[in-house]
Amino acid sequence: MKNRTVTPALVVLVLNLALGVACTLLPPVVMGFLSLLRDVLGVLILPFSFLFGLAGWSTDLSSVAGGGTGFMPDSLRHPFRAIGAAGLLAFSVVCSVTACNVPEGAWTERIAAPVMTLAALLLVGWDPGLILLPALALQMYALRYPTMQLPGRRA
């Protein structure tokens, strides 16, 4: 028997995991653009820093050099870590949808989904991983109620 109904909990779960993928992949992309901008501005400032150095104005040289370093934060996340976490979250979405579609079986997918979400949470860190907590709670709820229906509500 197949469960073809889409419950609101499943919609919230899929949207939350999609938001988690977006929040996982967005910081490395933005940091890459900022790094590119810093390099371009460094090339544009190079003649002025050379002239300030020839004139002996070291205070102006340090302020010009400090303008380029203000773009990038020190904690740049490794992009492969973000790609790995996004892959784990995508696998978790597939497992959750598959497990909800077959409520009698699919225990492997039902158990693998929160494990993959927890691994992605540990991979990206605590601060970005807070977005994934509702999805993790819904996946733990799906272990008890495989159809993801509310206990008092029957369709």
Image (cartoon, helix red, strand yellow):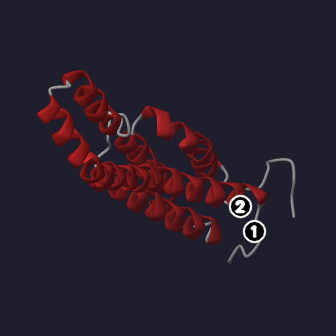
The crowd level at tag 2 (other Cα within 10 Å; few <14, some 14-19, many 20+) is: few
Asked whether the viewer can see residue 86, the reply is yes
Q: Amino acid at mark 1?
A: Val
Q: Amino acid at mark 2?
A: Val
Observer-side mark, 1 or 2, equals 2
Q: Position of residue 26 (x, y in %)?
A: 47, 54
Label whose residue precedes the other's in the sequence (1 or 2): 1
Query: What residue would you read off at disc 2?
Result: 11
Instruction: Using the image as rendered, state which of residue 130 and residue 134 is in the foreground.
Output: 130
Q: Position of residue 99 (x, y in %)?
A: 57, 65
Q: Position of residue 22 (x, y in %)?
A: 52, 56
The crowd level at tag 1 (other Cα within 10 Å; few <14, some 14-19, many 20+) is: some
- Pointer 1 with pointer 2, Cβ within 8 A: yes
For marks 1 and 2, give the CA distance: 7 Å
Residue that appears at 51% across and 68% down: 94
Query: What residue would you read off at disc 1?
Result: 6
**Residue at disc 2, secondary structure:** helix
Instruction: Using the image as rendered, state which of residue 42 and residue 15 is in the foreground.
Output: 42
Instruction: Using the image as rendered, state which of residue 40 and residue 143 is in the foreground.
Output: 40
